[in-house]
Image: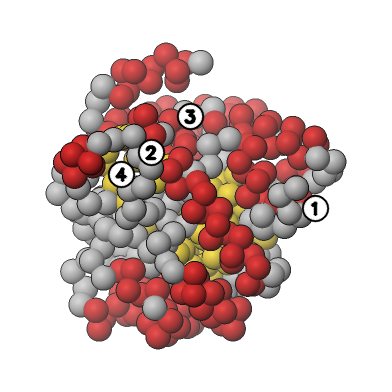
Amino acid sequence: MIYRLLRPLIYALPPEVAHRLAFFFLRFVVGFYPIRKLLNAINGHRDPALQVKAFGLDFPSPIGLAAGLDKDAEAYEALGALGFGYVEVGTITAEAQPGNPRPRLFRLVSDRALINRMGFNNGGAERAARRLSRKRETIVGVNIGKTKRVKDEDTIEDYQRSTRLLARYADYFVVNISSPNTPGLRLLQAIDKLDPLLRAVRQSLDAHAGRYVPLLVKIAPDLADEDIDQIADLAVNLGIDGIIATNTTIRRDGLSLSQREIEAIGSGGLSGAPLRERSLDVLRRLRARVGDQVTLISVGGIEDGDEAFRRIKAGASLVQIYTGYIYGGPGLPKRMERELLAAMRREGFDSIQKAIGAGEG
């Protein structure tokens, strides 16, 4: 209710300014220890039916925050206190970088969507490692990407450097090779490039984490079906723990904006409601290909508990939200939990774990 009243004021601000103000509130108000402790006590009480076991971790809820919001691991504890079952930070690069020129983030309110060309703006892996070293109550995934200035031939070493710095602080680790905003990054989805990259990151994780850390890869929605199949097969063959599907899209189909308005915004990744069906299609294809050998996380166009349950029945063990959170506000994770439980019980499931891959009815 409060967020609904404040939303017109928030939307009057440039999106990136609003984002920084929101993070100030998260870090210094929600993140203030007594407040965070109180919120954890309130939001930490969940129905056991929501619990999910995935790649060796026990998640209190399948609803997580996607990478892209907490780029620098600044507010993961506060976000966990607001009700997320887990938080994925990043994308983090080995070196600090400012990202692309502004403006680089755009709201498409009528489509419940965003376009961003942020360009992995972050303070680098070393700074993120210091922030992640704190004791925490929230499951945290660490999402890493390529430093923009690094030459193509040094890409693997760049990912390994991030891995060495961050491995010990991650509950799970994500290799992002699917953002459209770093030149050449999506080319890493080609099997001949992806295979040695994932092998190298796995070796670095094993050498520096001091324990087993699940490794996941995040893919684009714009891949051809045969490329999705190849990545699925590679994940099975290498023993990759999970695939996150999907990142943002470079397509602009079905938007309410005119062609002139779309061209005025320019390049970038589109996220939110317009991505819903393609993200679901990729999930279904992956599930059919990998079976239960690889854990799947679905992200893209998820705005409520009913859609989250649709993804779970289609084969996702976990779901993530990002754009939906921007439009739905801080109460969305708990609201989605209630909706998810209601959807589950309507269809006769007594736990989310039993509903995974059950089919969409």
| Label 3 element class | helix
Question: What residue is drawn where x is 53% and y is 60%?
Answer: 282
| CA separation in Å, label 2 and label 4 | 7 Å
**Horizontal and vertical percent position of residue 235:** 56, 76
Residue type indicated by callout 4 = Ile
Q: CA distance from mark 1 to mark 4?
A: 36 Å
SS state under label 2? strand
**Residue 342 location in percent, x, y?**
74, 32
The residue that appears at 55% across and 57% down in the rendered structure is: 281
Q: Are marks 1 and 4 in contact (CB under 8 Å)?
A: no
Q: Nearer the viewer, mark 4 or mark 3?
A: 4
Q: Amino acid at mark 1?
A: Lys
Q: Nearer the viewer, mark 2 or mark 1?
A: 2
Residue tagged by mark 3? Answer: 328
Q: Position of residue 119 (x, y in %)?
A: 25, 55
Q: Report which residue position mark 2 lands on.
A: 113
Point out which mark residue 354 bears.
1
Q: Is residue 63 visible?
A: yes
Residue hosting label 4: 115
For the residues bearing labels 2 and 4, Cβ distance under 8 angstroms:
yes
